[in-house]
Amino acid sequence: MKIAKFLLVAAMTSVLSVSALADSHGAKDEKGFTVYRSEPGKAVEMLNRAVAYMQENSSERAFAAFNNQAGQFHENDLYVFVVGIDDGVMHAHGGAPEAIVGDQVMELTDAAGTKIIQAMMDKVKRDGEGAVEYVWLNRVTNKVEKKTSNVKRVGDYLVGVGFYTK
């Protein structure tokens, strides 16, 4: 039920979020508005900062920082998410913490039916880190788009930051 609420909140906040940030990394939507898209390198930088923060602080403090939408781990279309390796619970989600934090998300699927959290878990359990591609609702354009999440294992947690690749 909370996952459905998360998707609804994501759709409803599309207009309120980063709807018209104009800069050199923008792409035009069908109405000609500039839509900000972060560079893949910025997602990697944020992930590395999040991993360092988790290693230097308690998990509770890290989760609070990652869930703070006005904080250092939420920038334009980038945010940090954290899932427990053993329990599959979303502990932090900078995009919509009120809708999904605390939920067991192992069955969460993308628009194509792929179990995306399971794919991310498989990647970090096998390789320790990596990238997972999927399709997801972009809250800015309100369209399903290709997205890549870079993920790393930090102790008992999967930490990730995703970016749209369209």
Image (spheres, rainbow, N blue to C red):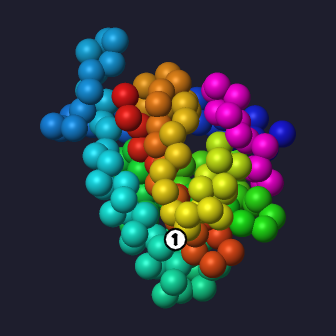
* The N terminus: image quadrant: top right
Report which quarter residue 81 is drawn in. bottom right
Q: Position of residue 120 (x, y in %)?
A: 61, 52
Residue at the right extreme, as displayed: 1
Q: Residue at x 39, y 71 (%)?
A: 49
Q: Residue at x 48, y 27 (%)?
A: 145
Q: Is residue 153 left or right of residue 150?
A: right
Q: Position of residue 66 (x, y in %)?
A: 53, 65
> In the rendered structure, which segment of residues is drawn in magenta?
102-115
Is disc 1 placed on a helix, strand or loop? helix
Above or below, comparing residue 4 to residue 60 in the picture = above
Q: Label 1, on which residue?
A: 65
Question: Which SS type dominates the magenta stretch?
Answer: loop
* The C terminus: image quadrant: top left
Q: Is residue 104 left or right of residue 81?
A: right
Question: The residue under label 1 is which amino acid type?
Answer: Ala
Question: Is-magenta flag for residue 105?
Answer: yes
Above or below, comparing residue 116 to residue 48 in the picture = above
Q: Is residue 141 left or right of residue 2?
A: left
Q: Residue at x 80, y 54 (%)?
A: 104
Question: Is-magenta flag for residue 88?
Answer: no
